[in-house]
Image (cartoon, helix red, strand yellow):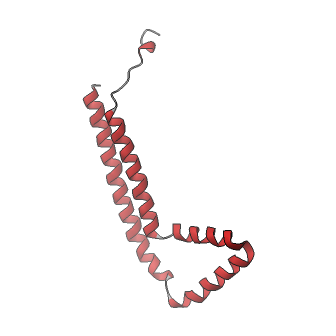
Amino acid sequence: MSPEQHARRWKRAGGIVLAVGVVAAGVVYGVGSREAALADEASMQGFYKSEAHQMGMLYGKQGLLMDDLSNDLKQPGTQAGLILVVAAVGAVGCFVFAKFPEVKDDNTEGRG
């Protein structure tokens, strides 16, 4: 395979990774935002307040911090953002590999 074909293949892979990431983030956000509307009812506010108090009593400030982090990771906006970040890092990795020429190992050609 020529270096141009190698680079083209990596660039195509990077574009696919980025496109799939954007579509997946959109789907996760779209589906998750509809379901999140049900959890924001006014009747649930008292439950969340007592739950936070109970967590504070049992686990202290670190438990509250971990519970807040866990709740934030359940939000569709946060999940979509993480998907976009991972897709962008993967795509950048593909684009960086596209700049490197394909390396052939000459030591293995003579062996049988």
Q: Nearer the viewer, residue 97 or 34?
A: 97
Quarter residue 54 falls in = bottom right
| Looking at the image, residue 85 lies above or below residue 50 | above
Image side of residue 26 versus residue 36, left or right: left
Locate residue 10 relative to residue 34 in the image: left or right.
left
Residue placed at 38% from the left, 59% from the top?
Answer: 24
Name the residue rendered at 25%, 30% in the picture: 4
Instruction: Find residue 57 and report its horizontal and vertical position in percent.
Output: 73, 78
Image spot of residue 58 (x, y percent): 74, 75
Where 33 falls versus 12 (above or below)?
below
- Residue at image position (26%, 31%) is 5
Number of numbered callouts drawn: 0
Return the residue nearer the eye: 37 or 91.
91
The residue lying furthest to the right in this view is 58
| Residue 40 position (above or below residue 5) | below
- For the N terminus, give its image quadrant: top left
Q: Residue at x 68, y 72 (%)?
A: 61
User: Could you say where residue 34 lies in the image, as x and y percent from the top left?
Assistant: 41, 76
Question: Of 38 and 55, which appears nearest the observer?
Answer: 55
Residue 90 in the image: x percent, y percent? 40, 47
Say above or below: 98 vs 110.
below
